[in-house]
């Protein structure tokens, strides 16, 4: 068989995999499958049975394209393939692969559509499929939006099954034993007499076969690995200090660089004096990069020292200088011509409230930094012919495109070595730090340069969570919430972020109202409107974007109304909720926490909050105690339903980690702007939760939902409002502004 | 200018001796990472706020971003020496069993900080753990498992 026809047949597999993954495309040009990138440069004894599985005589490699920032998705991807392939994920090689059309994320774009997530009607369904097509055509290989598990789980299990059946066919043709009599186990095909043939011995044979595409996935009852506790593939290196992060990349002859950019983002470079910096020890060069200067030295610390010695007169950027002025912009933006969406409009809010007592409140959340613990970095080697990049990223395709644009090499001459990230929380959905690193390395051809931002640079040059204002009105009658009208006002995260890494999609910016308009409550008169304020500081996606602010608004205000009505916080939420999956979560949290109201004794208080985000309903109950040092969070209960759980140990870690994230930032974090830049430039002024403040957690995953979904984000959103509601129960003080430590102390 | 004053500095790191010629005020963190290629200690903040750079000097947990190379007063232990025989330090065994790490970037520092605690107190209470560990930041929020793993490691240390 000629190589060409093999390629064609193998390539078809991706198309069928996409279909199996729930994505069917209507026209041929779109249905045409992406080529299998692994087929290039294969040796005689290597078989790339699908874009995700490579079997060679030397070993098995699984391609795990979604980026691991700590959420465990690398291990998850390996286990999904391994479940069907019957290999031990700890014994195979895991490779993030290269940016390629075969690995696009077909779900993430569909997540932003302005349809209620529970609405599976024909229009939302069709448009979601269209967005999958857009994603596919534009090569959107994102990791984000808690979408990886939902997007990949069937594709990867299918890839594993295809590889397994193809290897069985290869074994059959080698031994003459019919496929039906063959089993697979731990990386081998097992013959009826008990003889094992390792997959690696079948590679040459398998490379000559057409892949077996007619395969059935194992039902959950027959799973061998999934659904039970297993060891994450990265746990041992991360417990022994042997994990290599981007910041640890070491190459022969490498130099170290750092950047000092305009603290006012986008203000550009002004007149500067580098005369002192230039003469400092170890400094090899000072170059201009986008928005600032870079120092290249023989040691990171020396580069940091020299960067500090630069004198620059920074031009002002095009946004107001202070937070106070920015809040004024938001306040002024609350006018009808700025209304961007009204995706929830049930009953007649205006009519009902014209005849009732109106209860109103205003809430605010500040800018917040991502500050992953590993400062942003990238190592780049530019030569005349090619570019190699080592970094941690959620957007490898954007990086590849940037390298082509900056250096002029061809796309296939760019290699992106994706490394596990020391945290991201959405920060690595931008690639500004990699663009700078490429610009720097371009000036030192043939020499690898590791560019590391100082922590101060990281805080000053984040694309933070936007500041967000909410004005809410509502009314109650007969002990029930009857009208609820929520306006949220913020600069558009969609416009800001999409314009940097993708294309700004048409239609309203759903980030403005995510976590508010799409809740399963059936309040008779219920309205949620998003108002787009003018653009200010460039902003980015922050763990559960939109929902992390909107759930605080929505659930705080709902609690205030329920208090006005004199109803029970949980009973009233249940009464308003019809969706059975969401009801299940609320019922579970009541049972777990032994709910009997928010009064749990003197000096103590209990709060509840709920949010349906990323297709996962999550309810949280929090108990606090007022101590002499301030408020202490004692217990947190979390109930969620993300459908079947593949990895219960990591799922629990994601729930509690997301809650710690939501709580810590609500307690004590904000970025405030003075002179165009954040005042907070390191962790002394932006702490988050620390170990001594960490409560006891109790979690439950219900597995009733039919949608299998990711858990990196959903438990973040309800954490802040549950805490606010608990603080109110304990102290009578209502948190209408983050961080809460502006109004109460924490122990 | 004192900033660039050079000294020959002798260091013992993970049992090996090194001599380096550099500015005496270069923080130990950067000597380890960029001059000696010892990458277990991580840079997180550079101002003693996160603990990612924690090493042991003479058994005490210290922030290597804050110790000038010229001031190192004893042998330095990094995570690499704690796990020399594979992963069999009781803390590392417990860290693996409880699957503490998420991104893992803080964990070398967390483990060394916990090692210094268990060196002095093999039955730490929750509040002793709080006191010892609260200056080590974990942005991923792995704190509940850090607590559990320390208790577990303490138990196996007592039993061994
Ligand atoms: S880097 Fe030393 S404490 Fe953060
Ligand atoms: S595990 Fe990510 S910072 Fe601790």
Image (cartoon, rainbow, N blue to C red):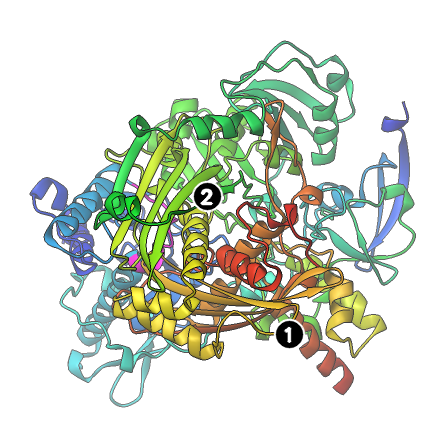
A202 is higher (above) or lower (below) than A263:
below
Image location (x, y in percent) of residue B59: 85, 63
Q: Residue at x 44, y 67 (%)?
A: A651
Image location (x, y in percent) of residue A742: 64, 45
Mark 1 or mark 2, whichever is nearer to me: 1
Magenta extent: A140-150
Label 2: how many residues lie within 10 Å, few (<14), some (14-19) or many (20+)?
many
Label 1, secondary structure: give it.
helix
| Marks 1,2: beta carbons within 8 A | no
Residue placed under numbered mark 2 in the picture:
A393
Q: Is residue A193 magenta?
A: no
Q: Is residue B132 left or right of residue A182?
A: right
Q: Is residue B34 visible?
A: yes
* Front-lying residue, A627 or B14: A627
* Front-lying residue, A60 or A407: A407
Q: Is residue A47 visible?
A: no
Q: Is residue A147 magenta?
A: yes
Image location (x, y in percent) of residue A133: 19, 43
Residue placed under numbered mark 1 in the picture:
B148
- By secondary structure, the bulk of the magenta-drawn segment is best described as loop
Inter-mark Cα distance, 1 to 2:
31 Å
Tag 2, which chain? A
Q: Is residue A1 left or right of residue A462?
A: left
Label 1: how many residues lie within 10 Å, few (<14), some (14-19) or many (20+)?
some
Quarter of the image with the C terminus of chain B in it = bottom right
A52 is higher (above) or lower (below) than A449:
below
Tag 1, which chain? B
* Front-lying residue, A611 or B34: A611
Q: Is residue B26 left or right of residue A78?
A: right
Q: Quadrant of residue A682 in the image?
A: top right
Q: Residue at x 10, y 52 (%)?
A: A122
């Amino acid at each position: 068989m000629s190589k060409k026809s093999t390629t064609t047949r193998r390539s078809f597999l991706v198309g069928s995999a996409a279909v199996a993954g729930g994505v069917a495309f209507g026209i041929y040009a779109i249905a045409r499958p992406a080529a299998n990138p692994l087929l290039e440069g294969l040796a005689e004894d290597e078989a790339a049975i699908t874009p995700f599985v490579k079997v060679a005589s030397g070993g098995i490699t699984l391609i795990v394209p979604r980026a691991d920032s700590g959420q465990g998705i690398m291990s998850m991807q390996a286990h999904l393939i391994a479940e069907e392939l019957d290999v031990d994920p700890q014994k195979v090689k895991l490779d993030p692969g290269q940016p390629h059309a075969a690995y696009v994320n077909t779900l993430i774009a569909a997540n932003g559509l302005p349809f209620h997530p529970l609405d599976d009607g024909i229009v939302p369904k069709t448009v979601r499929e269209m967005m999958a097509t857009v994603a596919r055509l534009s090569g959107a290989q994102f990791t984000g939006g808690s979408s990886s598990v939902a997007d990949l789980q069937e594709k990867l299990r299918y890839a594993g099954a295809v590889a397994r059946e193809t290897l069985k066919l290869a074994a059959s043709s080698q031994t003459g034993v019919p496929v039906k009599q063959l089993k697979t186990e731990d990386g081998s095909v097992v013959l009826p007499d008990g003889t094992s043939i390792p997959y690696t011995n079948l590679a040459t044979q398998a490379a000559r076969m057409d892949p077996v595409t007619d395969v059935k996935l194992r039902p959950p009852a027959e799973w061998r690995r999934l659904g039970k506790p297993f060891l994450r593939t990265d746990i041992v290196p991360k417990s022994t200090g042997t994990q290599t992060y981007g910041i640890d990349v070491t190459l022969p002859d490498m130099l170290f660089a750092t950047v000092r950019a305009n603290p006012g983002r986008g203000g550009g470079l002004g007149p500067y004096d580098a005369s002192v910096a230039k003469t400092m020890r170890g400094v090899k060069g000072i170059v201009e990069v986008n928005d600032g200067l870079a120092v290249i030295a023989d040691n990171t610390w020396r580069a940091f020292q020299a960067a500090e010695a630069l004198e620059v007169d920074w031009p002002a950027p095009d946004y107001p200088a202070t937070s106070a002025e920015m809040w004024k912009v938001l306040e002024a933006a609350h006018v009808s011509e700025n209304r961007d969406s009204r995706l929830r409009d049930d009953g007649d809010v205006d009519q009902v409230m014209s005849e009732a007592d109106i209860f109103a409140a205003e809430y605010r959340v500040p800018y917040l930094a991502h500050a992953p613990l590993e400062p942003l970095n990238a190592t780049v080697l530019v030569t005349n012919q090619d570019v190699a990049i080592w970094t941690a990223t959620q957007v490898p395709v954007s990086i590849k495109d940037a390298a082509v644009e900056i250096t002029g090499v061809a796309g296939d001459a760019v290699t992106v070595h994706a490394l596990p990230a020391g945290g991201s929380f959405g920060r690595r959905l931008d690639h500004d730090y990699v663009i700078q690193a490429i610009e720097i390395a371009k000036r030192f051809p043939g020499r690898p340069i590791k560019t590391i931002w100082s922590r101060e640079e990281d805080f000053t040059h984040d694309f933070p969570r936007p500041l967000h204002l909410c004005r809410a009105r509502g009314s109650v009658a007969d002990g029930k919430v009857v009208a609820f009208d929520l306006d949220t006002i913020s600069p558009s995260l969609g416009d800001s972020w999409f314009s940097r890494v993708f294309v700004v999609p048409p239609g309203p910016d759903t980030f403005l109202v995510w976590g508010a308009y799409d809740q399963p409550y059936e309040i008779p008169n219920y309205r949620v409107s998003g108002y787009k304020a003018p653009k200010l500081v460039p902003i980015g996606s922050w763990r559960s974007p939109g929902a992390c602010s909107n759930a605080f608004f929505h659930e705080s205000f709902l609690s205030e109304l329920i208090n006005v009505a004199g109803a029970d916080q949980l009973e009233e939420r249940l009464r308003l909720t019809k969706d059975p999956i969401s009801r299940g979560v609320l019922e579970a949290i009541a049972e777990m926490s032994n709910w009997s109201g928010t009064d749990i004794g003197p000096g103590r208080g209990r709060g509840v909050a709920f949010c349906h985000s990323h297709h996962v309903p999550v309810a949280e109950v929090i108990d606090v105690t007022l101590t002499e040092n301030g408020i202490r969070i004692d217990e947190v209960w979390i109930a969620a339903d993300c459908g079947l759980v593949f990895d219960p140990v990591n799922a629990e870690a994601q729930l509690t980690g997301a809650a710690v994230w939501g709580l810590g930032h609500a307690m004590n974090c904000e970025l405030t702007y003075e002179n165009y830049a954040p005042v907070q430039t390191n962790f002394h002024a932006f702490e988050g939760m620390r170990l001594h403040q960490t409560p006891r957690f109790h979690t439950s995953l219900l597995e009733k939902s039919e949608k299998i979904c990711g858990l990196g984000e959903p438990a973040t959103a309800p954490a802040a409002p549950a805490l606010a509601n608990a603080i109110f129960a304990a102290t009578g003080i209502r948190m209408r502004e983050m961080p809460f430590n502006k109004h109460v102390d924490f122990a | 200018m004192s900033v660039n004053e050079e000294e020959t500095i002798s260091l013992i790191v993970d049992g090996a001796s090194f001599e380096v010629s550099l500015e005496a005020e270069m923080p130990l963190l950067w000597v380890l990472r960029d001059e000696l290629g010892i990458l277990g200690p991580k840079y997180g903040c550079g101002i003693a706020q996160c603990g990612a750079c924690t090493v042991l000097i003479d058994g005490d947990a210290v922030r290597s971003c804050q110790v000038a190379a010229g001031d190192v007063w004893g042998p330095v232990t990094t995570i690499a020496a704690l796990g020399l025989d594979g992963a069999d330090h009781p803390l590392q065994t417990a860290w693996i069993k409880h699957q503490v790490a998420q991104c893992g970037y803080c964990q070398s520092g967390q483990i060394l900080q916990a090692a210094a605690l268990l060196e002095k107190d093999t039955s730490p209470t929750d509040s002793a753990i709080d006191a010892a560990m609260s200056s080590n930041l974990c942005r991923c929020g792995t704190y509940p498992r850090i607590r559990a793993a320390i208790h577990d490691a303490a138990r196996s240390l007592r039993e061994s």
